[in-house]
C-alpha cells in the first residue's frame, strides 16, 4: 500500500512541478509581450504607415479597381477553401475561409471613394491589407500545412497582396473627399 501512496505523492509532485513550469512560462511570455507592445507603440505606426511606405512606387490601381480586386481575392479564398474542404485538408480550408472573411469584412466597411459614408478609410484599408497578407503567410504555419503544396496558394496570394498595396493610389479616395469639401 505504501507504494500506491508513494506513487500518488509522486504524481501530485510531478503535476505541481509541471503547473509551476507552465505558470513561469506564461509569466515570461506575458512580460515579453508587454515589452514588445511598448516597442511597437514607440514605432508611431498609424493608418497611413504601410501605404505611405510605398509612396515612390508608380500608382496603377485606383480605388474602384482595388474594390474589384478585393472581390476577386475573396472569391479566390472561398474557392480554394471549398476545394481544400472537399479534399479533406481541414487546416488549409480554415485558413482560406479566415482570409476570405477578412477581405470581405474589411471591403464591406471600406470607404473606397472617400465619401465618409463607411467607417474604414481607403488608406486604413491599405494597412489592413498588409495584416491580411501576413495572415495569409502565417496561415499554413498556424494550421499545420506549411510543408504541403497547398501552402503555395497562400504564399503566392500574400506576395500578390504586397504588390497590390505598393501600386494602389491610397490617396485617391482622400482627394475625392477634399474636392467635395472644397466645392
Image (cartoon, rainbow, N blue to C red):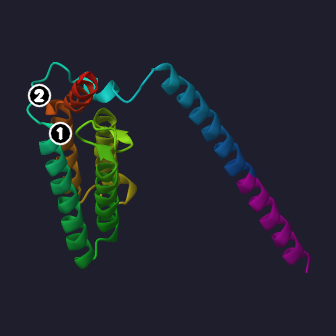
Q: Quadrant of residue 10?
A: bottom right
Is 64 above or below relative to 167? below
Image position, residue 153 (x, y; %): 18, 56
Q: Which mark is residue 63?
A: 1
Q: Is residue 12 magenta?
A: yes
In the current view of this chain or complex, which residue is farthest to the front? 183
Mark 2 and mark 1: Cα distance apart in space:
11 Å
Q: Quadrant of residue 91?
A: bottom left
In the current view of this chain or complex, which residue is farthest to the right? 2
Q: Is residue 68 magenta?
A: no
Image position, residue 97 (x, y; %): 31, 63
Dot 2 lies on which element? loop
Residue at 21%, 30% in the rendered image? 176
Instruction: Determine if residue 149 is in view.
Output: no
Q: Quadrant of residue 33?
A: top right
* Crowding near the residue tagged with mark 2, few <14, some 14–19, many ≥20 C-alpha atoms within 10 Å: some
Image position, residue 161 (x, y; %): 20, 42
Question: Magenta: predominant secondary structure element?
Answer: helix
Residue at 8%, 32% in the rendered image? 60
Instruction: Determine if residue 126 is in view.
Output: yes
**Location of mark 2 (residue):** 59
Q: Which residues are magenta?
A: 1-19
Between 49 and 21, the residue placed more toward the observer is 49
Asked whether disc 2 touches disc 1, contact meaning CB atoms under 8 Å apart, the reply is no
Of marks 2 and 1, the one in the foreground? 1
* Crowding near the residue tagged with mark 1, few <14, some 14–19, many ≥20 C-alpha atoms within 10 Å: many
* Number of numbered tags placed on the structure image: 2
Residue at 17%, 39% in the rendered image? 63
In the current view of this chain or complex, which residue is farthest to the bottom? 1
Amino acid at each position: 500500500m505504501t507504494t500506491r501512496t508513494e506513487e500518488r505523492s509522486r504524481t501530485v509532485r510531478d503535476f505541481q512541478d509541471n503547473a509551476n513550469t507552465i505558470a513561469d512560462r506564461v509569466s515570461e511570455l506575458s512580460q515579453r509581450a508587454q515589452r514588445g507592445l511598448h516597442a511597437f507603440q514607440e514605432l508611431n505606426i498609424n493608418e497611413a504607415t504601410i501605404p505611405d511606405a510605398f509612396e515612390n512606387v508608380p500608382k496603377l490601381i485606383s480605388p474602384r479597381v482595388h474594390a474589384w480586386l478585393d472581390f476577386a481575392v475573396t472569391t479566390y479564398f472561398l474557392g480554394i477553401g471549398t476545394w481544400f474542404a472537399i479534399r479533406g485538408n481541414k487546416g488549409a480550408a480554415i485558413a482560406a475561409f479566415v482570409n476570405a472573411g477578412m477581405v470581405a469584412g474589411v471591403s464591406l466597411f471600406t470607404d473606397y471613394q472617400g465619401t465618409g459614408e463607411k467607417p474604414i478609410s481607403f488608406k486604413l484599408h491599405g494597412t489592413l491589407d498588409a495584416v491580411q497578407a501576413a495572415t495569409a503567410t502565417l496561415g499554413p504555419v498556424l494550421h499545420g500545412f506549411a510543408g504541403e503544396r497547398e501552402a503555395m496558394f497562400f504564399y503566392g496570394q500574400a506576395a500578390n497582396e504586397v504588390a497590390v498595396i505598393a501600386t494602389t493610389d491610397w490617396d485617391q479616395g482622400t482627394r475625392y473627399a477634399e474636392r467635395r469639401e472644397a466645392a
